[in-house]
Image: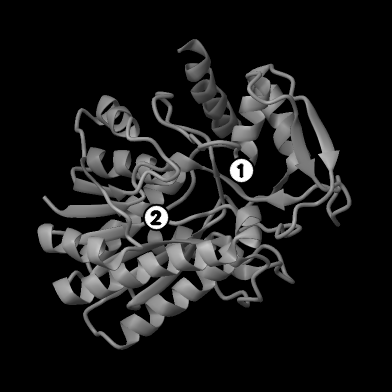
Amino acid sequence: MKKILVTGGTGYIGSHTAVELIEAGYKIIIADNLSNSKIEVLDGIEKITGTKPEFEKIDLSDKKQTSDFFAKHTDIDVIIHFAAYKAVGESVKEPLKYYENNLGSLINILTEMKNCKIENLIFSSSCTVYGQPDILPVTEKSPIKKADSPYGNTKQIAEDIISDTISSSSNLKSIALRYFNPIGAHKSAIIGELPIGVPNNLIPFVTQTVAGKREQLSVFGKDYNTPDGTAIRDYIHVVDLAQAHLVATERLLENKNKLNFETFNIGTGQGNSVLEIINTFEKATGEKVNYKIIDRREGDIEKVWADTTFANQELGWKTKLSLHDALLSAWNWEKNFIEK
């Protein structure tokens, strides 16, 4: 049984990926500092899979903590590195926090991979590496433009760090999954997106507003060059995204990678505006969303969606779940909290 380290595994994407890995027969260990997640997520993973994953609370941006962790766990076959700060707006206000955490943790992990001879890394990258693309949809060969936020820049720099490290070390392999906007929740409604404090992502703000936890949803900007004036993103169901990590894991373990560092766009290939999301949510759930349109948010790009042809053909991965499915599952997850 191969062992997978999932950093940030009590977080939103990490927890859903943990479920997919366990159900596929992998043994996992989660490392997380719980700065933006809750330990109870482990119970949710256990309820779904019947297995409670091994867990260590650790700050991976701390070099000694990271070194001690890897000295203790010597049987890791693949690392899936999710652990990072990820709020675009916050990164504009606190850039050093983002550079220190997001890049420091990656450097510490790569250092220990070389020390411990761990060969396989899947990196949680982002479509923000493309900045505002000149041509849509974006392919993996689209230019990497200047990032519009420090968060996006940490992802650009991180990919460079991984590439340079691999170039200097013949036994390392990595896949960077550049994902677009994950939404939704597991069909059980036992795990889902659980932001600490005020949400930074659209869908938790939508569901919390409808649930009465927030007075009103703020839509950032109505003057973008889009059909309805609101920003467009490629919204992917988090379970489809989690399954992409499972496929990438198997690709590395089976040595099917064509290059030692590969990148794939993980999205649906379709863009939806914020107002389209609100309208689809209302149709899927029968609930009304109270919203207001305010000024643009600093660091946000206008529109982006993926060309997923390469991931579909090379990885053999495709999305299976619809926008309707994702929004309904997000609401069912939110209702689970209301009922509790």
Residue 308, quarter of picture: bottom right
Residue at x-position 52% and y-position 35%: 184
- Please give the label number shown on residue 82: 2
Q: Nearer the viewer, residue 7 or 119?
A: 7
Per the image, label 1 sits on a secondary structure element best described as loop
Residue at x-position 80% and y-position 51%: 296
Q: Position of residue 160 (x, y in %)?
A: 46, 79
Name the amino acid, label 1: Asn
Name the amino acid, label 2: Phe
**Residue extending furthest toward the bottom:** 168
Quarter of the image that includes the C terminus = top left
Residue at x-position 25% and y-position 38%: 23
**Placement of 45 over or under 83, stated as above or below:** above
- Which residue corresponds to mark 1? 201
Q: Position of residue 306 (x, y in %)?
A: 60, 59
**Placement of 103 over or under 323, stated as above or below:** below
- Please give the label number shown on residue 186: none
Q: Is residue 175 left or right of residue 211?
A: left
